[in-house]
Amino acid sequence: MGMTMAEKIIALAAGVKETRAGDIETVTLDKLMSNDGTTHLTIDMFNNKIKNPRIADPGKLIWIVDHNIPADSPKTAASQKKMRDFAKEHGIKFYEGEGVCHQVMMENHVRPGELIFGADSHTCAYGALGAFGTGVGCTDYLYAMVTGQSWLLVPETIRFNLKGRLNDGVYARDLILWIIGRISANGANYKAMEFGGEGLKTLNMADRISVCNLCVEAGAKTALMEVDDIALGYLREHGREPKAIVKSDDDAVYSEVIDIDLSEVIPVVAKPHFVDSVVPAKECLGIHIDEAFLGSCNNGRIEDLRAGAEIIKGKKVAPKVRFLVVPASRAVYKQALKEGILETFMEAGAIIMNPNCSVCWGACQGVIGEGETLISTGTRNFKGRAGHKDSFVYLASAATVTASAIKGEITTADML
Amino acid sequence: MNQTFEAKIWVLGDDIDTDIILPTEYLALKTVDDMKPYAFSPLRPELAGMIKPGDMIVAGKNFGCGSSREQAPEVVKALGISCIVAKSYARIFFRNAINNGLLLIENSELHDAVTEGDTAKVTPGEQIEYNGKIYKIESLPDNLMEILDAGGLVNAMRKKNGL
């Protein structure tokens, strides 16, 4: 009986020949990412709750300040200082101001075949490079940091066979929201979502990261994509080699196989307050917005900014609408600067911000007030997620968000 | 951890996400005790003030979906909640809760039967008795029970690995 990608990567990390969904394995982690959302808690536990505090392998730790950068209060400044000082003392790779953690990880660290814990739910993004990334809390992180290991229940896998190609005006963001709408917010709970098939070849790396990143919103433990020339090209471009390239066996056992014809996907919107509350974008036309957000680990890459810039070039942001544009990393920011994209957004009246998590997580800048509505390329639209508990978040693609910013109400680019 | 206890029930719905359990704006508060008044505030601002130590939560599917913020199970534990019974849990919350010594029970029927304010009799790993009816519940795997019994992962690791 064959194994899935998830089973193979866990077997590698556990040092066993084979493993099956349902087994519990003790694994050695390849990398451990943590950000300023919770690292201060990890440090407190490390300093105060462990008898003999030590780090198994500081070389595997990567700490990234992205949730509140630059600090917005003495409290967040103190928490970031704690993180910065600890990283220096223990020789931990440390980034601040470089970008949203998952984008920084994709650009600089993730390798196919690795098993990576991230103290952030969207760690499943790393599957775009064929790595098993999974989100954990700070106690699991602490345990892995101290021992180098953790336990994992080997997940069942849902296989998505992609065929065809997305139509013009339809984006990977639409695809993953559409999938979540179809399988629901716990449709893949505890499971791995594996993507392959001919259609995968039509998706570039930005598309793939966007798809994998959002799989946790269907409950997935991880997302995994087959590693092909596009993934290997990206890896080489960024100066890295794979740990291992694994592929599911032909006779691997899946809990479900879902065929998706990419040409059937249409622009969609996830309505408040659930990510799986997905409807065709056309059903939301005319809904008034107060703010639009283009950015985040899900949709703040150069390709997303290009899509927005193309739509807004020569046009203006609607009066009384704040349009926040937040490149996902310094590299993305520099590229957008070089291509004149930031100038286009500035001319249109957008607010360009430094790479950070921004309003996607409802801290940082850009939070919305009581009764306000945001259309966003962020990751979540939970009640109160972007600010006041009585506010509303719609999730959509970079194109739909930009078009809506111009119109002042929800619309799609083809309706402008 | 198999002693029977009685608990007053608070009922919540499906997809109770981590931003509802503890909104982002309160994550920066210094201690989990400071966060307690804001638990569940987007949904039921009055709830945290009414929960008494020993009470239990009965919820629908996908409890704890969303972020990896560990303050979510921590604040529930700090409120004194003895256990949560839900139809299902989101996986990161599940791990975080066990790691903080918060008992989670999965049961698909109880939620549809209960009325808020009633009490139920819980025997972990065996059954829940409510309104004269017995609801069978499964025990967690051994490695998780070890963590729960130790009062969380940090304690378990001190005990087991001597760390």
Image (spheres, coloured by chain):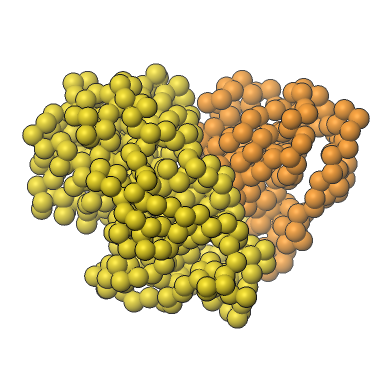
Q: Residue at horizontal 37%, vertical 46%?
A: A264
Q: Nearer the viewer, residue A265 or B134?
A: A265
Q: Is residue B131 at least partly visible in the picture?
A: yes
At which x and y percent is residue B110? 77, 34
Q: Residue at horizontal 34%, vertical 49%?
A: A263
Q: Is residue A262 left or right of residue A12?
A: left
- Up the image or down, A369 lies above or below B54; here it is above
Q: Residue at horizontal 33%, vertical 39%?
A: A267
Q: Nearer the viewer, residue A292 or B8?
A: A292
At which x and y percent is residue B152? 69, 53
Q: Is residue A269 left or right of residue B163?
A: left
- Up the image or down, B119 lies above or below A220; here it is above
Q: Is residue A392 left or right of residue A334?
A: right
Q: Nearer the viewer, residue A410 or A25?
A: A410
At which x and y percent is residue A196? 42, 63
Q: Nearer the viewer, residue A185 or A162?
A: A162
The tint of chain A in the picture is yellow
- Up the image or down, A233 lies above or below A119; here it is below
Which part of the image, by quadrant, shows the N terminus of chain A? Answer: bottom right
At which x and y percent is residue A86? 43, 59
The tint of chain B in the picture is orange
The residue sitting at the right extreme is B132
Q: Is residue A68 at least partly visible in the picture?
A: no
